[in-house]
Each structure stands twice: as structure tokens, then as C-alpha cells.
């Protein structure tokens, strides 16, 4: 099927919308943008767009403000157009079972159609035709690539039972990975399993449906010589144990297939604290079919009893703290470009990091970097005894470039300046380890995860707030944590914080110590080992049952 033929098919499907007055579109990605551009969808009464990705919610998208599905009063909606290829069944299930939607659900593809219409061959640009009598390109390619035709008759792969009975075969452990912010967790678990001769870990890079960040994730894996595979290449493979972190994200079609091919499923949620006070979300865990959950004690205590009974919950501590623990002990290798900060002329070092991409109409309460950049860099340039590690979040830099606030030339020029500076380092390492190890204090936005993950290091943290926008909502997200840090809402307070660090003062350290005791179960570098040991025991029990 050519692209033009599928567009015609979609337009014919959309004709049913003429009888409805309240239409919602599910999905605020490239597929919906192509629909708006190439089909008649916007000629109907579209009232809004929803997306489960919290990073898109609140942003303007083709004149609509992207909303969370949880915000919609679904009884008022007549029809939902699903604009997320290969996830129609999952979204239908969410709409009907979780959101109790009873209206009409319009899917734009058949179950055997896997290619988005804009990726089909363009009839105007190619003379290629489907061979023989195949109905579409997918069926043609599926038949040509049927591996069973390339093997002798009677050959059968190892069954699940025989896999568990084979002593020589290592236990395969897949670690789902979609966000650089969870690298510390991935690193700890990967090497906990890798150090045990019974296991063979592999990191499964999630890109499609999760921001297509394959390149960034792959760079991290290569820099640490970790075994990895892309999710789309892993769908047909059997796996023994699957571990997921970002349970709040709905699994894509590829991930659902990986889940179905795993014998045991476990969750290690990324969170250290629960902002909504409800602990573990049972629906999120069910989406990934997990049976074992590993978390901090504070999250476990806030989880309802019925959820604890449904899932095997283990209070092991978050493995992200293992990597931080080794940085805290300076048990890591410092890259060469950081070593200038170890000079005797540098008295104190400050790590400055930003939140994720919080730009909405160029500016949002989440990121305050633009307000403090002048005063901080001016101070650092004048006070060579103060070292600065600057680590902006990658997607934030990407947004600055995309919005034209920075040019590539400006970015390269400033990075070059940092390299040549006596006391400034631009940190683009795969992880925070060097920064954590060297920094005496930290500057971060209020929503940045570092304000929680850095707690056990007992370093003073200055939380940068915007003074030109309302920030009450941000402060309410994790007020107890923020109260143990130093809130900065003016240039004067920024300079006061830096001078406090240089004078080795820290009046809030006892507050942080108490919070650390409350929220951090273990800080000894062994949380990944604890999780591995429990899963190993569970696997042995499951194996014995299977053999028996």
C-alpha cells in the first residue's frame, strides 16, 4: 500500500466523525501532526488532544493545549481518535477499563498494519510495486522474512521449560531503559547481575514512543561497555527476568511483546519519595505484569495494603544510591577535563544543573537558569578560587537550540570557553559521578531529581526559583525536601549562597540528615546486590517448581 492510498483510507474512516460534536485525539506526537497536515481530521469538531507523556502536557500543539487523560471528563466526550500507531489495543483498554469511557473509539489501522502512513512508499516518488498478490507492504515483507523458510523442517527452538532446565545457560536479565535520568539505577543493577556468573544482563533501549532518544542512550552504553539492544530488535527474543523502572509510562507495542516474552517481571520504580502521598500505583504495575516490586521504605509505607498483597513488595532501597555512594567515597575515575578543578588554587566547587526541558512558550516556572546565568558566570569569572561544574540537562539545551535562543555556534563557543577556563567545566559525561565526587555544593531547579538523589551526600543544595512567575505549585510538589535546602529567588540570595559555601557554612545540614534517615533506606552501595539476590532466590524457586 502506498502512502496516498492509506491517507485516502484514513479520510474514509474519519467520515464517521461528522455526526459527533465533541472529538478528542489521543496522542500529541509526530503521527498526529502528520494527520493534521495530510488528512481532513481538523475539518471535524476536534475539541482537544491528550497524551500520557507528562513532558508534553500543558504545551501548545496545533492550537490545542495538550492535556493528561486524567484531566478529561470523559462523559462529555463523544469519540476518541487514536493517533498512536501499534498501541491501539492498549489505549482502548485504558479508555474503557481505567477511564470508564463509553463513547466511540476510532482506530485508523487494522491489526496487521504496523507502518505509520507517512512512512509508506510515496506513489509520486517511487515506481516500486508489491510483488505477487500481497495486500500490503507488511504482508509482503513478513512472508519474505519468514525465518522458518531458512531452516530445515523439524527444527524447533528451545521451549521455556527446557530453557529453565538447562544448567549451562545463563539467566538472561533485561533492563528497560528510556531516560538518562535513571542511568544510576541501570548501572547498579547491570553490574550486580554481571558480577554473578549465573546471569547475563542486557540493557534494552526504549526509543519509539519515549522521545526517540536511542542515540543518547546508546552513547551511555558504549561509554561504559555495557551490553545493550534496541527495543525493536528485541521483540522476538525470550528473556528470563525483565526489570522496568519508568512504570508511569504506558508500554508501547514493542515493549508489550517483550513483556509477554519474559518469564518473570519486576519493577524498580525510579522515585525516592511519593509526591502524591499514595505510594505505588497498582495500575502502573499491572501494565507491565510485574509480580516483584523493589522500593524505598517511604514509598512502601504509603502503599495501600491491598496493593502490597497483590504484588510482592521488597524494601531494598533504590539502586540509584549505589552509584552516588561510590562517588561520595571518591571511588570513581575522574575524567581529565575535571582535574583542573583539583588544583590547590580552587577552594570550593559548585555543581550547577538544570531541570528537564520545561520550556512552554519559551519560559516556564520549572527552569530558572536564564535568570541567574549572568550573575553566576560573572561571579565565577571574577573569583578563580571558586570552581564551577556546569551540567545543563540535554533536552533543555536542545530546546534552547530548537527555539533559536542559542545557536549551535554559540553553544560550541561557550563549551570551548569552559574547556579553556581555569575554573569552569562543562559536564557532558554520561553520568553525574565525577560531578558528585568533586562538588562541595549543588545548584538545581526545584523540580530537578537531584534535590532528592543527592540527599545522602549531605552537600548543601541551593534551589533556584523564578522571581518573575508563580512558583507555588512547584514548591508544593516536595515541600518537605525543599525546606531542607536553600531557596534562592533573587540575585542577592544567589551570591549569599555562593559566599556561604566559600565560608564553609551549612545551617540546614541536620534537617537533611533527618530527611535522609526518613527517605533513604540504605546508603552502602549494595541496593543492586539486594535486588539481584532476591530475584535469584525467586528464580530458583520458580525453576524448581517448573522442573518438578
Image: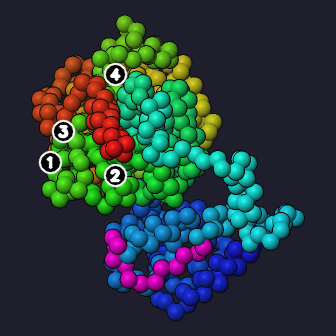
- 294 horizontally vs 153: left or right: left
Magenta residues span 97-110
The quadrant of the rendering that contains the C terminus is: top left
Name the chief secondary structure element in magenta.
loop
Q: Please state the horizontal and vertical placement of residue 201, each as a whole percent of the image.
A: 46, 33
Q: Which residue is mark 1?
A: 301
For mark 2, does the 10 Å Cα neighbourhood hold few (<14), some (14 to 19), or many (20 or more) residues?
many
For label 1, the SS is helix
N-term mark: 1 or 2: 2
Does residue 377 show up? Answer: no
Residue drawn at point x = 45 percent, y = 66 percent = 90
Residue drawn at point x = 38 percent, y = 55 percent = 288
Q: Is residue 92 above or below residue 500?
A: below
For residue 327, the mark is 4
Q: Nearer the viewer, residue 498 or 39?
A: 39
**Badge nearest the viewer, 4 or 2:** 2
- Identity of the residue furthest to the right in this view: 127
**Badge nearest the viewer, 1 or 3:** 1
- Identity of the residue furthest to the top in this view: 344
Mark 4 vs mark 3, CA separation in Å: 20 Å
Mark 4 vs mark 2, CA separation in Å: 31 Å
**Badge nearest the viewer, 1 or 2:** 2
N-term mark: 1 or 3: 1
Q: Which residue is mark 2?
A: 290
For mark 1, does the 10 Å Cα neighbourhood hold few (<14), some (14 to 19), or many (20 or more) residues?
some
Amino acid at each position: 500500500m502506498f502512502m496516498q492510498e492509506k491517507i485516502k483510507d484514513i479520510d474514509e474512516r474519519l467520515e464517521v466523525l461528522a455526526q459527533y460534536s465533541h472529538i478528542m485525539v489521543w496522542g500529541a506526537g509526530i503521527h498526529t501532526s502528520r494527520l493534521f497536515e495530510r488528512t481532513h481530521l481538523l475539518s471535524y469538531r476536534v475539541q482537544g488532544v491528550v497524551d500520557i507523556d507528562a513532558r508534553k502536557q500543558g504545551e501548545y500543539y496545533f492550537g490545542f493545549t495538550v492535556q493528561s487523560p486524567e484531566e478529561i471528563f470523559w462523559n462529555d466526550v463523544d469519540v476518541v481518535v487514536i493517533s498512536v500507531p501499534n498501541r491501539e489495543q492498549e489505549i482502548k483498554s485504558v479508555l474503557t477499563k481505567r477511564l470508564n469511557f463509553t463513547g466511540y473509539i476510532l482506530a485508523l489501522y487494522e491489526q496487521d498494519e504496523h507502518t505509520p502512513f507517512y512512512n509508506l512508499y510515496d506513489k509520486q516518488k517511487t515506481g516500486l510495486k508489491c510483488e505477487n498478490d500481497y495486500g500490503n507492504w507488511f504482508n509482503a515483507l513478513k512472508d519474505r522474512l519468514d525465518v522458518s523458510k531458512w531452516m530445515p523442517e523439524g527444527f524447533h527452538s528451545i521451549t521455556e521449560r527446557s530453557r529453565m532446565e538447562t544448567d549451562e545457560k545463563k539467566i538472561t536479565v533485561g533492563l528497560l531503559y528510556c531516560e538518562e535520568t535513571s542511568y544510576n539505577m541501570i548501572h547498579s543493577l547491570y553490574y550486580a547481575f554481571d558480577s554473578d556468573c549465573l546471569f547475563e544482563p542486557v540493557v534494552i533501549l526504549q526509543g519509539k514512543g519515549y522521545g526517540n532518544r536511542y542515540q543518547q542512550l546508546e552513547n551511555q552504553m558504549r561509554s561504559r561497555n555495557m551490553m545493550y539492544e534496541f527495543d525493536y530488535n528485541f521483540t522476538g527474543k525470550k528473556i528470563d527476568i525483565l526489570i522496568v523502572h519508568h512504570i508511569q509510562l504506558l508500554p508501547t507495542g514493542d515493549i508489550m511483546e517483550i513483556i509477554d516474552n519474559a518469564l518473570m517481571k519486576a519493577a524498580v520504580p525510579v522515585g525516592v519519595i511519593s509526591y502524591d502521598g499514595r505510594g505505588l500505583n497498582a495500575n502502573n504495575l499491572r501494565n507491565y505484569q510485574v509480580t516483584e516490586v523493589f522500593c524505598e521504605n517511604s514509598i512502601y509505607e504509603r502503599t495501600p495494603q491491598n496493593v502490597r498483597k497483590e504484588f510482592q513488595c521488597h524494601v531494598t532501597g533504590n539502586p540509584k544510591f549505589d552509584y552516588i555512594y561510590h562517588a561520595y567515597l571518591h571511588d570513581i575515575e575522574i575524567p581529565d577535563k575535571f582535574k583542573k578543578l583539583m588544583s590547590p588554587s580552587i577552594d570550593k566547587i559548585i555543581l550547577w544543573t538544570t531541570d528537564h526541558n520545561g520550556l512552554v512558550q519559551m519560559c516556564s516556572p520549572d527552569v530558572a537558569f536564564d535568570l541567574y546565568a549572568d550573575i553566576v558566570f560573572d561571579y565565577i569569572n571574577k573569583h578563580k578560587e571558586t570552581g564551577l561544574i556546569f551540567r545543563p540537562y540535554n533536552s533543555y539545551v536542545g530546546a534552547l537550540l530548537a527555539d533559536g535562543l542559542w545557536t549551535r555556534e554559540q553553544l560550541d563557543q561557550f563549551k570551548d570557553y569552559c574547556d579553556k577556563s581555569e575554573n569552569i567545566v562543562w559536564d557532558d559525561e554520561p553520568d553525574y559521578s565525577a560531578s558528585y565526587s568533586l562538588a562541595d555544593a549543588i545548584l538545581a531547579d526545584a523540580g530537578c531529581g537531584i534535590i532528592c538523589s543527592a540527599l545522602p551526600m549531605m552537600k548543601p543544595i541551593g534551589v533556584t526559583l523564578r522571581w518573575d512567575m508563580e512558583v507555588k505549585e512547584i514548591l508544593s510538589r516536595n515541600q518537605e525536601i525543599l525546606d531542607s535546602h536553600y531557596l534562592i529567588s533573587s540575585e542577592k540570595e544567589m551570591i549569599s549562597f555562593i559566599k556561604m559555601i566559600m565560608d564553609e557554612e551549612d545551617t540546614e545540614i541536620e534537617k537533611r540528615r533527618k530527611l535522609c534517615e526518613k527517605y533513604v533506606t540504605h546508603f552502602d552501595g549494595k541496593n543492586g546486590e539486594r535486588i539481584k539476590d532476591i530475584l535469584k532466590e525467586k528464580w530458583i524457586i520458580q525453576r524448581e517448581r517448573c522442573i518438578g
